[in-house]
Amino acid sequence: MAGKMRRSEASTSKSSNSRGEIVVVDWGRCRSSCGYCKSAGRTSISHGLWARSITVDDYQDLLDRGWRRSGCFLYKPEMEKTCCPSYTIRLRASDFVPSKEQLRVLRRMQRLLDGTLDVKKAVEVVDDADISKGKCSCACHEVSSSGTKESLSAKNEEKNRAEHIVNYLSDQVDKAIHSCAESGEFPCNIQLPNASVKQVSQAKRKLLVGAEELMYSSNIAFQIVATIRRVQAAERVMRHDAENDTVSPKVIAEKLAASLSQLTETSGFSISACNGHINFYTSTTQASSSEGAQIVIGSKESLQVVKEKPAV
């Protein structure tokens, strides 16, 4: 029945249950790679249907019988033969017990739907309370507002400074990639991806304790390896050669880090390769000095070192 149109058993009883009919295409047994055990072979086995039209009730019946859905494709795993049987846990909705906060929100929502909730009155009460605070409250708000503006301005300035650094480092990594391609270390007959350097979050920095602090990192080596492997795989298929994969992100990252060694003197960052990543470090004393951290701002032509004022 694979590939043929057919109607489900539920659709034949249109007059009795008023569900309407459903139209599906029987795809038969389907084999694919497993997303759970990451098997190399097609060990995930299921029976598939392509739904052209299906009612909600019939779809619910399929779910109750162990069927699953991916877009318009319905499938039921063959539990005895598939590598990772998946089971559905059904919970009874009647066993749910709402909390006090959920009940309060539910009652408020019901009053709003019934039209008995006076929203304007609640707003007026808040406005009266604000007016009663007097001029002192207004002055406090003005001070708070000015402090907030200064804080936002400082954050925007810091964000722009970090973006300048990221753009500069990305350009330098791109130059290193082109240099390696011209010297023959990378294939020059393929389109290599553009580099992307990202700032390391404060949470990840806290996990790394040492004399230097990781500030920026790039995973461009993994993207380069993926591009080279795709091209080499296509060439092997055309030549009917056996697989011979010798490219690794670790080697690529080490070559790029060596090519970027001159940045240490101009930017103040120390650069190293670690497990395929290109990391940019700065000393912890420089990053957390009480006098202010030195931030590198650069463009394609030059670098400028600026000392950031300490936060008050």
Image (cartoon, helix red, strand yellow):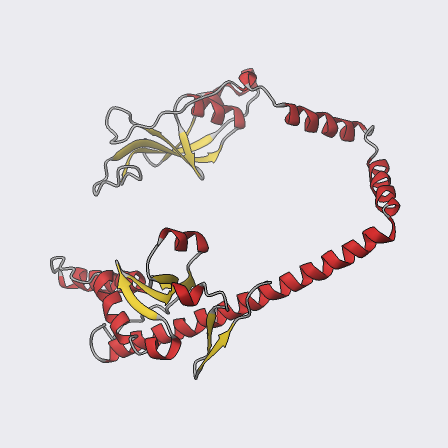
User: Can residue 300 be seen in this snapshot?
Assistant: yes
Q: Is residue 107 above or below residue 294?
A: above
Instruction: Return the residue nearer the eye: 45 or 150.
Output: 150
Please give the count of numbered marks on the rendered protein. 0
Q: Is residue 204 above or below residue 181?
A: above
Q: Quadrant of the C terminus?
A: bottom right
Q: Is residue 193 left or right of residue 231?
A: right
> In the rendering, at what x and y percent does residue 100 appear?
65, 23
Q: Give the residue furthest to the bottom.
A: 301
Report the residue at 40% width, 25% height from top: 88
- Say which quarter of the image contains residue 150: bottom right
Report the residue at 85% width, 42% height from top: 129
Report the residue at 49% width, 67% height from top: 162
Instruction: Return the residue nearer the eye: 73 or 270.
Output: 270
> In the rendering, at what x and y percent does residue 25 appear?
39, 34
Instruction: Return the residue nearer the eye: 120 or 80.
Output: 120
Q: Give the residue furthest to the front.
A: 290
Q: Is residue 75 left or right of residue 100?
A: left
Q: Is residue 306 above or below residue 235?
A: below
Report the residue at 54% width, 16% height from top: 95
- Say which quarter of the image contains residue 107: top right
User: Can residue 234 be seen in this snapshot?
Assistant: no
Q: Is residue 305 left or right of residue 42?
A: right
Instruction: Return the residue nearer the eye: 238 or 166.
Output: 166
Q: Is residue 201 left or right of residue 230?
A: right
> In the rendering, at what x and y percent does residue 6 appear?
41, 29
> In the rendering, at what x and y percent does residue 116 appear?
83, 28
- Say which quarter of the image contains residue 1: top left
